Amino acid sequence: MSCNLRAAFNKWRNIDNKISLLQELYDSGPVRTDDWEAGREIHNLVEFMKDERFSDHEINQFYKDNVKNRNENLMKKYIIKMKMKGREDNVIVYCLDRWKKFTRIRKLVSHTLRLCENRTQEVKADLSYAFNKWKNDNQNMDTALCKLSYQTLKEIGVKTS
């Protein structure tokens, strides 16, 4: 009788520990942090679109088409990854993570080396300087236009078209 009671108590304790761990991870774990950051980014994006005078229909359509589908696909990937970690062949997940990290680093090094090579060649360096000057002039114009009111920008647009 005491063995059955002890086994039942141990089973209850293990289940209770799992439930409390799940609740703790939901409240403060990395998934909750990712969810909060994603929600914050979506909220900021919607506010930015409202500031840029998008209609509510356009905002909802953009959210439905792009953001929601992307988040659902990322969650599906995350769930599949979590299910694979519980299995014995979780080496695949580890290898895929390492491969992704290697690919990112390889692209970053390739980009940096290409940039260094272009800076050392005279013709490409001159072109790069001219392009950067042209690109930054547009940013200076953007900062000047941001200070103008919406009505003034509308009038400028009508005059130039």
Image: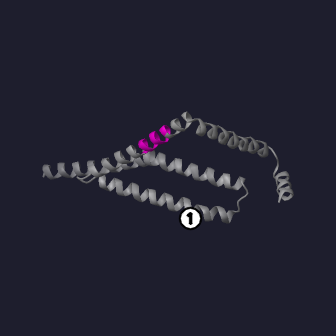
Q: Main secondary structure of the magenta part?
A: helix
Say few, some or many: other residues with alpha carbon within 10 Å of mark 1 (under 14 / 14 to 19 / 20 or more): few
In the rendered image, residue 40, in percent from the top left (x then y), is placed at 57, 49
Q: Is residue 154 visible to us here?
A: yes
In the rendered image, residue 41, in percent from the top left (x then y), is placed at 57, 49
Secondary structure of the residue carrying tag 1 is: helix
Residue shown at the point (51%, 37%) measured from the top left: 117
Magenta region, residue range? 104-113
Residue shown at the point (42%, 41%) measured from the top left: 105
In the rendered image, residue 18, in percent from the top left (x then y), is placed at 32, 49
* Residue 108 drawn in magenta: yes
- Disc 1 residue type (three-letter): Asp
Corner quadrant of residue 139: top right
Residue shown at the point (38%, 56%) measured from the top left: 79
Q: Is residue 49 left or right of residue 81?
A: right
In the rendered image, residue 30, in percent from the top left (x then y), is placed at 43, 45
Corner quadrant of residue 118: top right
Looking at the image, the residue that sits furthest to the top is 120
Residue receiving disc 1: 65
